[in-house]
Image: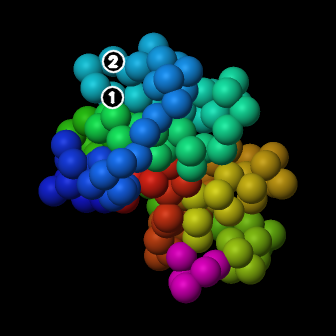
Amino acid sequence: MTHLDKGKYYEKHPKDSRVDESLKEAILAQTKDNNIACKKAEGIAGEKRVTIAEVGKAIDILNINIIECQLGLFGYGDKKKIVQPAKEVATELKTKIEQSLQNGNLSCVSAWKIAAELSIPRMRVCAACEALEIKVKPCQLGAF
């Protein structure tokens, strides 16, 4: 979704889409000014034992903005994104990224997986992608 879609996130889903009441309550409890941080959404997924994609769909249906992407790609006020290209990309990281590409892009899920495998911050994987001119998409919450 782009900034042009803001306020119409629910349109990505069938009109009869509904959100489980317990999940809705958990999301709304973590929402401030109609925004929810990516990390909060991840926490809800773990707490409710649902996928991050399910939480993302619920967030869309509730028409809530996702902010503070854990990869640094969006939701940081006027700056939009905070990730900067890495000055150097370790060979092992570059190889893992290249092996995980789908249609020339690295999915958010793959970026998180690589970070966990290498025990590095998620944003470092995205910084490497910025340096390698690789787009990180799709977002597992359904943003952008």
Where disc 2 sits, the SS reads: loop
Please give the name of the residue rendered at 34% of the width and 34% of the height, measured from the top-left corner: 62
Q: Residue at x 37, y 55 (%)?
A: 13
Answer with left or right where residue 74 lies relative to residue 95: left
Residue ID for mark 2: 32
Residue holding disc 1 = 35
Indicate whether residue 24 is drawn in magenta.
no
Q: Residue at x 31, y 52 (%)?
A: 15
Image location (x, y in percent) of residue 144: 36, 59
Q: Indicate the secondary structure of the residue bearing disc 1.
A: strand
Question: Closest to the observer: 123 or 55?
Answer: 55
Q: Tell me if 55 is positioned left or right of 61 in this view.
A: right
Question: What amino acid type should be assigned to the residue bearing mark 2?
Answer: Lys
Q: How many marks?
A: 2
**Residue 73 visible to the viewer:** no
| Label 2 Cα neighbours within 10 Å, binned few <14 / some 14-19 / many ≥20 | few
Considering depth in this image, is 10 or 4 the residue closer to the camera?
A: 10
Secondary structure mostly seen in magenta is loop
Residue type (three-letter) at the residue carrying disc 1 = Asn
- Which of 113/64 is in front? 64
Disc 1 from disc 2: Cα separation: 5 Å
Q: Quadrant of the N terminus?
A: bottom left
The magenta-colored residue range is 101-105
- Mark yes or no: residue 99 visible: yes
Q: Are marks 1 and 2 in contact (CB under 8 Å)?
A: yes
As drawn, the residue found furthest toward the front would be 16
